[in-house]
Image: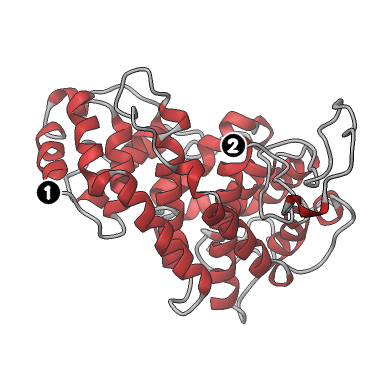
Amino acid sequence: MTSSAAAAPGGTTGTALSVLPRVLRQALGWADAHRSGFVLPPDVLEPHTEVNRTLKPLGELAQLCTTIVRSTAPDTPEHGTARELITFAWEQVHAGDLLLELLRGEPFAAYPYEIYAAFAGYGLRNEGFERLAGTLSGTRGWAHTEQHANRELGLINSELRVGTAPHTDADAVLARTWLGGLCEPWMFEGPSGYALTHTVFHITDWCCFPERMPAGIDAYLRDWLPPWIDGCLESRQWDLTGELLAVAAALPGPPPMDLLDAAWPALAAAQAPSGAVPETGPTLSPAQPPEGDPPPEAARPRDAGPEPDPYPFLACYHSTLVIAFAAALSLKRLTAHPADAAPAATGAAV
């Protein structure tokens, strides 16, 4: 791995285990303190409501916190906070009744099903939703809905979580993905990077079952994750870096210690004191205005309370949740495999 990941930003160096507990605690604390940003509006079922600003953040909160619960010890504060956030998200969807209404209104939309599957994977169920979903998933229209391969893998994983038969063969769909094709590594860029990470999330059930990853894909990722992560850190792609580090923590066998040790301190340095991490670009302190903004006219009064977050909610919620998700996975792997943690050696197939 080249030196930029170990030194950027700010020349920070050190091992992953020296920063991961703080990164996880602060990122999850930010999500807990910003529950209001995940609250669904009263008109969430209306056609004009933007799904990406309402249901998508809440579904991601539920999904990523489910993995955090599965990756942390029951007696830790982070485990308790993640459980509370899942309960909060379940209350927001009215114990699944709101998702049932969405499915009735959009019977062939995948997103209500996928959001529901995040809760089902945690053991939260709604009988009415599953009855309707069972009917819909048996239709020709459901089986032949056209979508990108990595999105179809997400639907297959959701079907498995809910307990219905997958509508198609997962191995055949995996072969059609960018990652399944073991594409030329120099073709890696933003869209292919996110397609790659989500392919891994879906085939490993959000990184909880690394043994489901095919050996050829494991070897390919061990070869190419280091330069890809290095490039993302250099270009300040914090969100994609976090997703790639979650993938690194989902590799079967020994975790890639050299990669995690180089990348995590650099990513930790991008985290604001509040725990927030921006998706991309320069990192700011709470008191630092964005580039090009005029300086404040007066100093902040002493009694004004804590400094505000430097980023708007929609500019940092996803990356902050991803960093918490990846940190929990990395901590679990590094503490569970202290003796056999291995460097990210080229061609290290298992």
Say whether residue 105 is visible.
yes
Residue found at x 29% / y 35%: 112
Label disc, if present, on residue 11 of the rendered structure: none
Camera-side residue of 112 and 261: 112
List x then y, in percent, for residue 65: 45, 57
Q: Residues within 10 Å of mark 1 (few under 14, many from 20)?
A: few
Q: Secondary structure at mark 1?
A: helix
Residue found at x 80% / y 41%: 234
Report the residue marked by disc 2. 193
Inspect the image, locate mark 1, and give the three-letter code of the amino acid beneath it. Answer: Glu
Left of 5 or right of it: where is 136?
A: left
Residue found at x 90% / y 32%: 295
Camera-side residue of 52 and 206: 52
Q: Residues within 10 Å of mark 2 (few under 14, many from 20)?
A: many
Camera-side residue of 313 and 246: 313
Q: Secondary structure at mark 2?
A: helix
Camera-side residue of 218 and 148: 148
List x then y, in percent, for residue 165: 17, 45
Task: Determine whether 104 is above or below 282 in the image.
Answer: above
Task: Determine whether 189 is above or below 169 in the image.
Answer: above
Report the residue marked by disc 1. 127
List x then y, in percent, for residue 195: 51, 35
Residue 189: name its quadrant.
top right
Residue found at x 85% / y 30%: 291
Left of 170 or right of it: where is 164?
A: left
Inspect the image, locate mark 2, and give the three-letter code of the amino acid beneath it. Answer: Gly
* First reached walking from the N terminus: tag 2 or tag 1: 1
